[in-house]
Amino acid sequence: MTPIPRREFLTALSALALSPPRLSGQTPPAPIRTRALNHVTITVADVKRSVDFYQRVFGMPVQATQAAIVVLQVGSGPQSHIIAPAGPNGVVGINHFCLTVEGFDANRMLKIVTDLGATGGRIRMRGAADGGGGPGAPDGTPELTFRHPDNIGCQAGRSPLSKPPIAVRTLSHVTLTVTDAQRSVGFYQKLFGMPVQTRQGPTVLLSIGSGPAFVAFGGSPTAKPGIGHLCFTVENFDADRIMKTLADAGVKQASGPGGGPLTAWVRPRGPENNGGGRGSKATPELYFTDPDNLTMQLQDVRYCGGSGPLGEVCP
């Protein structure tokens, strides 16, 4: 899989907008239904260094390789964490994320997104050189690309370590920084029918499939659009224990963001942002930065972005 340009919205819709957002939990009608968060791709300065870090700390096995790109398996799969070289422009970052949908048909879905006002729509046939094609797909694996209102990227082995320090289970969510949250939420709801799962203050969280995975939308009119962070889940989340484990793996404790690569901190999300409750004053949320200073989050497998000691309570 070739990383897409930073400002292109890519959706690889696997088989399995422009209107005001619906702010209730009821699923609105939509032409395309999401089912799961499939993968997130990051572009890095040194692929080997990043692969070594994620394997050493989280035990992620190699699921596939595509030229210089390494696909790391998340949990039991098929979810994955894809690490790609930054390329000639040298831009590191969270490049795009992928949602799986029902009844994938690239041509039909290209018409749908075009009719909804999305621009830059095209179908890319990923060939054998990039891990595509195979039985039943002699011309390659189709991937649909189009542009999000803020041009944010989204794409609609070896054995793991026997006892990794931290065993990740699933991809929980991605948080998007946008210039107009109402417009972006409306786009996703009209295209995918994603209901509101919960809110964190002004931030709206839309459910992927039946949840608890979600896409979050925050930002302001002057914000720089992009993918702010992605989140992995673990069993039996304990912030203090995980912070110690990260420290043992060379990730230093910090008081908050801005400490540079390989740092970790805990944000206590209070009632003003729908945190706390059920005997806790706040919901602990754990963040860390990787070797390229990209922000990641770790939460419990039950995390839905809501209240409660594990963020597991959503309306």
Image (spheres, rainbow, N blue to C red):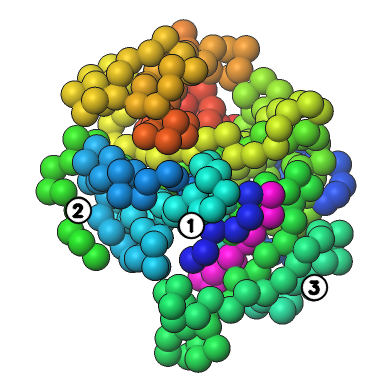
The residue lying at 30 percent from left, 43 percent from top is 49
| Residue on which the image places disc 2 | 160
Q: Amino acid at mark 2?
A: Pro
Query: Would residue 206 be counted in the magenta stretch?
Result: no
Could you say which is closer to the camera, residue 42 or residue 242? Answer: 42
Q: Nearer the viewer, mark 1 or mark 2?
A: 2
| Residue on which the image places disc 3 | 111
> Where is residue 271 shown, x and y percent of the image?
57, 12
The secondary element bearing badge 3 is classed as helix
Q: Sequence order check: which comes first, mark 3 or mark 2?
A: 3
Snapshot quadrant of residue 110: bottom right
Q: Amino acid at mark 3?
A: Lys
- In magenta, the rendered stretch is 7-16
The secondary element bearing badge 2 is classed as loop
| Residue 173 visible, this angle | no
> Where is residue 287 shown, x and y percent of the image?
42, 25
| Residue on which the image places disc 1 | 38
The residue lying at 55 percent from left, 88 percent from top is 139
The secondary element bearing badge 1 is classed as strand
Q: Count residues near mark 2 (Cα–Cα under 10 Å), then give few for <14, some for 14-19, many for 20+.
A: some
> Where is residue 181 shown, x and y percent of the image?
76, 35
Calculate the distance from the C-alpha at mark 3 to the C-alpha at mark 1.
Answer: 23 Å
Could you say which is closer to the camera, residue 133 or residue 24? Answer: 133
